[in-house]
Image: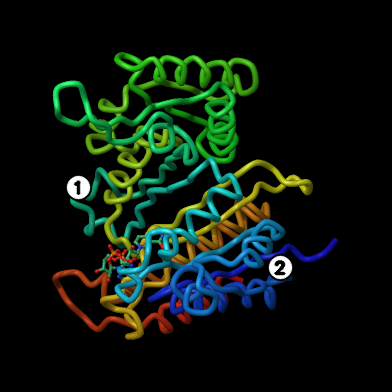
Amino acid sequence: MANPSILILPGDGIGPEVMAEVRKIIAWFGDKRGLKFNVSEDLVGGAAYDAHGAPLSDETMAKAQAVDAVLLGAVGGPKYDKLDFSVKPERGLLRLRKEMDLFSNLRPAQCFDALADFSSLKKDIVAGLDIMIVRELTSGVYFGEPRGIFPDNEGGRVGINTQRYTTEEIRRVARSAFELAKRRGNKVCSMEKANVMESGILWREEVQWVHDNEYPEVELSHMYADAGAMQLVRWPKQFDVIVTDNLFGDLLSDCAAMLTGSLGMLPSASLGAPMANGRPKALYEPVHGSAPDIAGQGKANPIACILSFAMALRYSFDQGAEADRLEKAVEAVLADGVRTADLMGPEGGTPVSTGEMGDAIVAALCASL
Ligand code: NAD
């Protein structure tokens, strides 16, 4: 069988810097673990606009559709702030998500013990935390019609957005959550507002239907999203996988992410329907942006991007044990006190550069053999 293919889109700002470290990790897995990937690279965001006048060319889009996984760095920067909306760097990312139909957004909130002090919550509440938020990404109130700002009958204006979900949109993201739960703690909590929204009632019924008919072996619970937000900060370790809609997922995943400390640590995956080879369409990217304030200075933390590659190993390439190996290598490096500038606590110390962090993780991988 051909080697699995990866398209790397480093993007702008710190994107290329953190992606260079991911390249070291990919090379290590090729050399030491026999995991050979067919890697290609292309432009997205401002870099693509500079080269082609568009934040994602049709050729790059076609490549993204054809590979097994896309790894993206970050897009955007002040240089592009005044561009027309239609060619802004972010449009490149939105086009990828839309045309690949990436409906399931996975945002893990994992707290490495060495960083437990970074959380705004007490150490014992977050230490060892490992939850996954699955957010529906392509429907709901961000896309529903009618939408817009219209004149009303009293001489004022009315702003309208429509929360809309179909059976199939709910079922497919629910399946993705149940599949994930089977590889983790076997528990799904579905969150909506069935107490005040009809779309919430449908959401609850359809998630329950998928459970009863397809995944009866997974433990399912339901929670109103506001209560869920409260529980996330009160006792987050009660959760394994949380599945929720686009709007609530946007809020809850940011909230959960911050339980764990720094933006430089947070990976994500966006998955679509299975391709002919059975693998889901997939885009992996750190949660952070292009960080123009530190770009080009070797200060960026590459861990979010490296952990995004660990997610690719797990969810696109069925290499769960190698994903564990990579996550453990990151944990070991942090436990040794190796820190980029964003992870320096009040006690201070000397931060390492982006490249030194990547090298330390490669060294920890070597030590794992
Ligand atoms: P940002 O995530 O780029 O940066 C926020 C803060 O976190 C900055 O102080 C930055 O230095 C720091 N930071 C972020 N990532 C870091 C890392 N890996 N290591 C160390 N520190 C890190 O968000 P922003 O400043 O609001 O946006 C900057 C640009 O990025 C904007 O053009 C925005 O539109 C774009 N953006 C892109 C994405 C994406 O590509 N997915 C996401 C968010 C923002």
Left or right: 239 as drawn, with respect to 278: left
Image-quarter location of ligand 1? bottom left
Left or right: 332 as drawn, with respect to 284: left
Name the kind of residue labelled 1 in the image: Leu
Looking at the image, which residue is at 42% across and 72% down?
302
Estimate the x, y position of residue 125 in percent, counting from the top left. 25, 43
**Helix or strand or loop: what does disc 1 sit on?**
loop
Looking at the image, which residue is at 57% across and 26% down?
171
Q: Quarter-wise, where is residue 68 in the image?
A: bottom right
Q: Which residue is mark 1?
A: 121
Q: Which residue is mark 2?
A: 35
Q: CA distance from mark 2 to mark 1?
A: 39 Å
Name the kind of residue labelled 2 in the image: Leu
Mark 2–mark 1 contact, CB under 8 Å?
Answer: no
- Nearer to us in this view, 183 or 293: 293
Residue 244 appears anywhere in the view: no
Neighbor class of circle 2 (other Cα within 10 Å; few <14, some 14-19, many 20+) is some
- Nearer to us in this view, 70 or 62: 62
Of the image marks 2 and 1, the number of the one nearer the N terminus: 2
The image shows residue 216, relative to residue 116, as above or below, that is above
Looking at the image, which residue is at 51% across and 52% down?
269
- Nearer to us in this view, 94 or 58: 58
**Helix or strand or loop: what does disc 2 sit on?**
loop
